Amino acid sequence: MDIVLEQVEYRYAANSPFEKKAVEDVTFKIPEGQCTAIIGHTGSGKSTLLLHLNALLKPTSGTVQIGERTVKAGRKEKDLKPIREKVGIVFQFPEQQLFEETVMKDICYGPMNFGVSEQEAKKRAAFWLKEVGMPEEVLGKSPFDLSGGQMRRVAIAGVLAMEPEVLVLDEPTAGLDPRGRREMMEMFYRLHQERGITLVLVTHSMEDAARYADKVVVMHKGRKVHEAPPRELFSDTARLAEWGLGVPEVVKFQRMLEEKTGKAFPKVCLTMDE
Ligand code: ADP
């Protein structure tokens, strides 16, 4: 299932004195089975866009096509449940949303809310808990007895237990140490590679975008200012310099991509000499 945004605009508190345009004229496609990264500084409109991906927000103009469904302004939407089922969002610090007495109940909550039987939900809970790298014994524990990193994995298992086709991750590694960040990203990447889950990675980490994405969408002040595969993005040294990325940083990303793809970049000129 592809998601296609076309000329999406979103204004908070539209037609009120507090109106605030957060996103303007944004068009791009999130292709099925790929990993698309949306990057940009704080306030560039990433979270607002993300809320459109499963119709939690409706554009104030433009359209968002989610699989077969088109969501657009000025139309009353019927049943949005099928969209919410297909597009799972892992919000920032998802562990803050845990609330049940046991890990099992917490993971089962979403699927059962969407009509999955208790028996099936329990089966899914055991399966997805393992997939996020946690032992089965944890199922009977209170989520509040776990470490922060473990709680986050449980919350993610809760979203995965809905078995979405598209998984949207909002700064999934926020607050983790470098090792935890790497493990978490590798886990998502493995799920993506092995199970074909479409990933949308919303991040301000250029490194994660370069390492994991097939395509990077760059947001700035509510607009899309660029869209390219990481290799192309990191060949464009002039543009990267405009965004404040110096040669050493660009070279670091290029080395990383060379390692990943086995394809060399042309040499970057490291001096200002003619
Ligand atoms: P990002 O996720 O890239 O930090 P956001 O989508 O949160 O960007 O914000 C985009 C713009 O919209 C910012 O100027 C922000 O202040 C504004 N904004 C975000 N949420 C609201 C809201 N609930 N009400 C009014 N303005 C908002």
Image (tube, grey):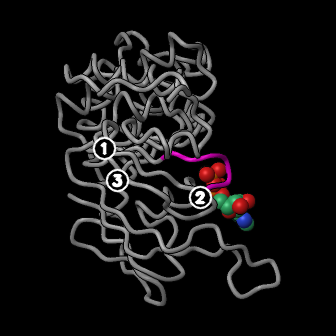
Foreground pick, 248 / 174 = 248
How far apart marks 2 and 1 lie (CA) works out to: 20 Å
Residue denoted by label 2: 45
For the N terminus, the quadrant is bottom left
Up/down of 232 relative to 78, above or below: above
- The type of residue carrying mark 1 is Pro
- The type of residue carrying mark 3 is Val
Give the magenta-colored segment's residue range: 39-44
Q: Earlier in the sequence, mark 3 or mark 2?
A: 2
Residue denoted by label 3: 87
- The type of residue carrying mark 2 is Gly
Residue denoted by label 1: 229
Is the CB of mark 2 within 8 Å of ligand 1? yes
Identify the residue at horizontal 20%, vertical 24% (top origin): 263
Identify the residue at horizontal 42%, vertical 35% (top origin): 209
Identify the residue at horizontal 29%, vertical 47% (top origin): 164
Task: Give the secondary structure at mark 1.
Answer: loop
Front position among marks 2 and 1: 1
